Image (cartoon, rainbow, N blue to C red):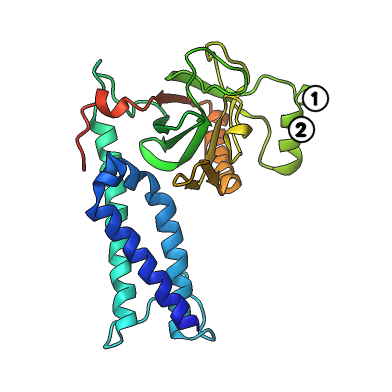
Amino acid sequence: MKKFAALLIIALVAIIVLVLFTNPNLFGKAWLYVIGFIGYVVVLVENGFKKIAGAFSGSKESKTDGFPLPHVDKNNDSQVIEQKTKEISALNQKIKDLEIKLQQSKIEEGTLLGKCTLTVLRYIDDGETTLGLIFLRNKFFAYTLEDTHQDEKVRGKTRISAGIYNIGYSPVDPAHSRITRDYLRDFQPWFTRHLHLRNVPEFEGIYIHVGNYHENTEGCILIADGVTAGTSRKSLRNSRDAYQRFYKIIAALLDSNEHVNIQILNEDWFDRSKLTSL
């Protein structure tokens, strides 16, 4: 039974990979969507194949820190698993290619896309939710979710304008902020104050924080390791883990008096840049 389930998972993954690479028109600028989901796909596939390999090699065997694949022999299952490992390596290479392109490419004004500490590339807005990719020093870090664009601000349902903003700790006293008190309770000892985007036109209290749906943002930027984009309601997954990693890195930079800023680009960043498809 375990072997059947493992083979089924392998078949599904293979079908998804084939669809993405043989039918790029399904996603318009397919390279962007493929790259956008690589981080989560790689994590899923790696974790999945660790379990699959364990099922094939016997549950009593000790686990190692490496990728526990059986040696290639006449067993077709072993050969399939090795093929999937090669595909994971290829996906990792594609995300590296995108990081290089971001570092080298310029928008019309000649400004480097990756000139800030953080870069958010918004890539889809369905009229309710905006999804994006966040890069830390031009390295893909996680997914983002914001409210939709509005020509005129609608309170609690509008994303902030594209632009460059400085980031610092929130100036609000935790005693006067319910959300800060909640985070202090839930994320001790590493959380102190929210990471705050400063001087955002028409907005106050714009943070980068935990959340899954556009109802959780009210103009803020949500961050997570996983994303669900193929359904009518777009959402994030594994937000708390991504936020903890993110917060610790940015807090360390701020505590060392390093200047931290973020560049946010709208969906037309592709057309305005010198990027070419991968």
Along the horizontal axis of the image, is 191 left or right of 242? Answer: right
Q: Which of the pair 151/270 is nearer the observer?
A: 151
Residue 144, compared with residue 4, is above or below; it is above
Q: Residues within 10 Å of mark 1 (few under 14, many from 20)?
A: few
Please identify the quarter of the rendering in which residue 101 is found.
top left
Tell me where residue 68 appears, x and y as whole percent: 42, 75
Tell me where residue 247 appears, x and y as whole percent: 57, 38
Dot 1 falls on a residue whose secondary structure is: helix
Q: Earlier in the sequence, mark 2 or mark 1?
A: 1
Residue at 38% x, 25% y is: 265
Whole-angstrom CA distance, mark 2 to mark 1, is 7 Å
Q: Amino acid at mark 1?
A: Ala
Q: Farthest right residue?
A: 175
Figure disc tally = 2
Residue at 35% x, 36% y is: 138
Tell me where residue 181 appears, x and y as whole percent: 76, 32
Q: Quadrant of the C terminus?
A: top left
Q: Are marks 2 and 1 in contact (CB under 8 Å)?
A: yes
Tell me the residue that label 2 is attached to.
Answer: 181
Residue 84, compared with residue 91, is above or below; it is below
Which mark identifies residue 144? none
Please identify the quarter of the rendering in which residue 114 is found.
top left
Tell me the residue that label 1 is attached to.
Answer: 175
Residue at 39% x, 35% y is: 137
Q: Amino acid at mark 2?
A: Arg
Q: Which of the pair 236/109 is nearer the observer?
A: 236
Dot 2 falls on a residue whose secondary structure is: helix
